[in-house]
Image: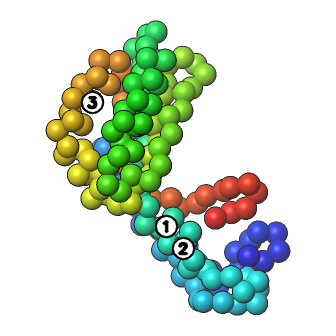
Amino acid sequence: MSQGGARPAHFIARQKIFVSPFRFRFRLRLEGHNRCESCNGLRHQDKRSQAMSTTVTLINVFTAKPGKQQELANTLAEGTRNFFSKQPGSLSSSVVVDGDGSKVANISQWRSADDIAAFRGDPRFSEYMKSIIELAAGESMMGHTTYSHTGGVEN
């Protein structure tokens, strides 16, 4: 990276966005070269960049029924620990609780959209979703990361 964290002019990010009522898909393609002096000899298309452009993030935001936020968060955490995390292609998952007492998000990263489809096709998934629907209504968004910021460094 050049000074100040800005990308050099020859480093271009392109995105394509596909939207449907239940899916958001983003694709990031990084173009560059193998090495350059302005980038301190680092490869533009290193493993992290490749992973960022191909990893699929699934974001589920739920609005819990009154008084059910913590139970929903616990159910999502248990499902993640015992079911999601053991699925082929599952890379990471987080459960995030909003301070207002009503919203809970489940953010997971997967190797591919096909892995998510296979996961959703598992017969245990429908049983799991029945337990979630008893506690909340929700929306789902699936996409590819187009921008990331970690510890003061743009990824």
Q: Amino acid at mark 3?
A: Tyr
Label ID, residue 66 = none
Between 19 and 145, the residue placed more toward the observer is: 145
Residue denoted by label 1: 51
> What's the distance in space between the residues labelled 2 and 1, CA to CA?
6 Å
Which of marks 1 and 3 precedes in the sequence?
1
Residue denoted by label 2: 47
Residue denoted by label 3: 128
The residue shown at (39%, 52%) is 90
The residue shown at (72%, 86%) is 41
Which of marks 2 and 3 precedes in the sequence?
2
Decide: is 69 above or below 104: above
Look at the numbered disc 2 and give the secondary structure of its residue: helix
Screen quadrant of the C terminus: bottom right
Image quadrant assignment for residue 100: top right
Decide: is 66 above or below 144: above
The residue shown at (76%, 57%) is 152
Image quadrant assignment for residue 141: top left
Decide: is 22 above or below 66: below
> What's the distance in space between the residues labelled 3 and 1, CA to CA?
29 Å
> What's the distance in space between the residues labelled 3 and 2, CA to CA?
34 Å
Q: Amino acid at mark 2?
A: Lys
What colour scheme was applied to this rendering of the protein? Answer: rainbow
Q: Amino acid at mark 1?
A: Ala
Look at the numbered disc 3 and give the secondary structure of its residue: helix
| Label pair 2/1, CB-CB below 8 angstroms | yes
Q: Using residue 97 as the reference point, say whether residue 65 is left or right of it.
A: left
